Amino acid sequence: MKKRILFGIACCIWLSGCVTMDMAGRIIDIDTKEGLSDVAITLKDNTDREINSVTTDDKGGFIIHKVKKGVYQLTYKKDSVIMPETKPIDLNILSKNGARSLSYEVMVESAVHGKIIDKETNEPVEQAGVKLINLGTGDDISVDSRDINAVSSQEDGQYGFEYIQPAKYKIQIERFDYLWIETPVFVAVKGKTLFFDDIKLEKCPIEEGIPISSGEYQIYSVTIDGEPIIDNSVIR
């Protein structure tokens, strides 16, 4: 779900030996009218050199003091929020009252992270196929219209899905020499990152030296901070 964020900058000028100004602004969710806190704001010059960096407060506000005349770029970043690049800001050209305002659209979404390990050895399992299946947002879950994202676990067993839409999901994990597993349905909430506890894969039975998988998914009780995800529960 795409969320619009209003981004505003007001520039105030104090004349002295050299012209400097304070750049103040606020980032808010247009739908909720609430400020977006903990957004990292970085001011760079036209050579990409960092001039200053600040973080928005609990009301989404920020201020950068004593900025000299010049051309600048503002970048801003927050987990699970897609922030577009701003256009260059030319502080050599200001309106008579020294005010500037800008607005942008961003996407406030969710993320899922976890790690896969061997049940017996507790060693990380790499190259396991991890599917994130979007089951929609309503009560009627239709597998025919589901959306699937897939990644492979890394050398350290880590996997992750970034910028997913708030919705109901389940995860399926498979590797040829392990039993396949599936998590209960869980709900990703806007702007939240879910960190699953380690998922433990069990080795397949071996016949004539070949791992044999049943080809069916076993339900695995995924936990977050030790608390189990109950089917259709909402993680907040």
Image (cartoon, rainbow, N blue to C red):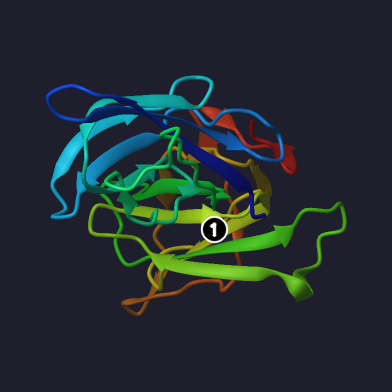
Q: Residue furthest right?
A: 140
Compared across the picture, whether 185 is left or right of 103 comes to right
Image quadrant where one finds the C terminus: top right
Q: Residue at x 53, y 35 (%)?
A: 223
* 20 is higher (above) or lower (below) than 100: above
* 67 is higher (above) or lower (below) than 152: above
Image quadrant where one finds the N terminus: bottom right
Q: Residue at x 33, y 46 (%)?
A: 75
Coordinates of residue 211 in the picture (x, y in percent): 38, 73
Coordinates of residue 228 in the picture (x, y in percent): 60, 33
* 169 is higher (above) or lower (below) than 53: below
Say which element carries label 1.
Answer: strand
Characterize the local packing of mark 1: few (<14), some (14-19) or many (20 or more) Cα atoms within 10 angstroms: many
Q: Residue at x 54, y 58 (%)?
A: 181
Q: Residue at x 35, y 35 (%)?
A: 40
* Residue identifier under label 1: 181
Quadrant of residue 23 in the image? top left
Coordinates of residue 234 in the picture (x, y in percent): 70, 36
Coordinates of residue 3 in the picture (x, y in percent): 64, 49
Compared across the picture, whether 37 is left or right of 120 comes to right
